[in-house]
Image (cartoon, helix red, strand yellow):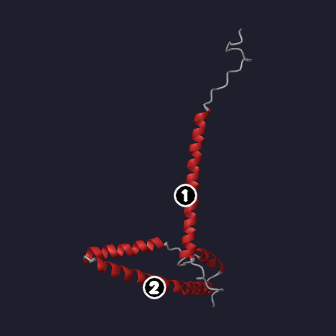
């Protein structure tokens, strides 16, 4: 038998040919895709956290879109002149800001009323019912979605 005879058990096959350039490119593409995906997730989470912290969970650009939608509707229905459009847009914007300020002032009071209602309901329930109620509480917003300063200072008064 010769050294190159395939029946010879002591002969080791030659190592496979590896194209390092191809697998490196694939790894680089996968890494970029993963980094992009993680960046999207982190960016989205940071934006949402900013909206919750600074605007009470309401994105300011959606409010501007709402004002524009109202103005488009009025322009279409009433055939407003440019002067009328500008005057009405100013009125809508100012009133919208005042309405937001009014609702912002009501949030702590609404939160307090919800907490007081929950406390009164809990007094009527059995311990087992209280545990279920705690999990299924009906709230307008969870505490983490309420703007800063909108929660009552202490527990609700009975």
User: Image quarter for residue 117?
Assistant: bottom right
User: Image quarter for residue 73?
Assistant: bottom left
Q: Residue 85: image x %, image y %? A: 31, 78
Q: Tell me the crowding category of disc 2: few under 14, some 14 to 19, or many 20 or more residues within 10 angstroms, Cα based.
A: few
Q: Provide the residue designation for mark 2.
A: 98
Nearer to me, 98 or 48:
98
Q: Is residue 41 above or below residue 61?
A: above
Q: Residue 152: image x %, image y %? A: 62, 85
Q: Provide the residue designation for mark 1.
A: 40
Q: Residue furthest top?
A: 1
Q: Quadrant of the N terminus?
A: top right
- Name the residue located 57 percent from the left edge and 40 percent from the top edge: 26
**Image check: 33 left or right of 61?**
right
- Name the residue located 60 percent from the left edge and 82 percent from the top edge: 149
User: Image quarter for residue 112?
Assistant: bottom right
Nearer to me, 95 or 124:
95
In contact (CB < 8 Å): disc 2 and disc 1: no
Disc 2 to disc 1, C-alpha distance:
35 Å
Q: Residue furthest front?
A: 83
Q: Residue 77: image x %, image y %? A: 26, 76
Q: Earlier in the sequence, mark 2 or mark 1?
A: 1
Q: Quadrant of the C terminus?
A: bottom right
């Amino acid at each position: 038998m010769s050294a190159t005879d395939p029946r010879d058990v002591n002969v080791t096959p030659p190592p496979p040919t590896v194209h390092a350039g191809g697998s490196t490119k694939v790894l680089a593409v996968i890494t970029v895709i993963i980094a992009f995906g993680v960046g999207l997730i982190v960016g989205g989470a940071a934006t949402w956290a900013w909206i919750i912290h600074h605007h009470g969970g309401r994105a300011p650009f959606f409010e501007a879109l709402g004002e524009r939608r109202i103005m488009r509707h009025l322009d279409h229905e009433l055939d407003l002149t440019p002067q009328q459009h500008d005057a009405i847009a100013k009125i809508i914007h100012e009133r919208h800001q005042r309405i937001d300020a009014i609702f912002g002032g009501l949030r702590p009071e609404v939160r307090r009323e919800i907490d007081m209602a929950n406390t009164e309901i809990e007094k009527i329930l059995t311990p087992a019912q209280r545990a279920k109620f705690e999990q299924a509480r009906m709230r307008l917003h969870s505490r983490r979605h309420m703007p800063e300063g909108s929660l009552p200072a202490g527990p609700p008064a009975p």
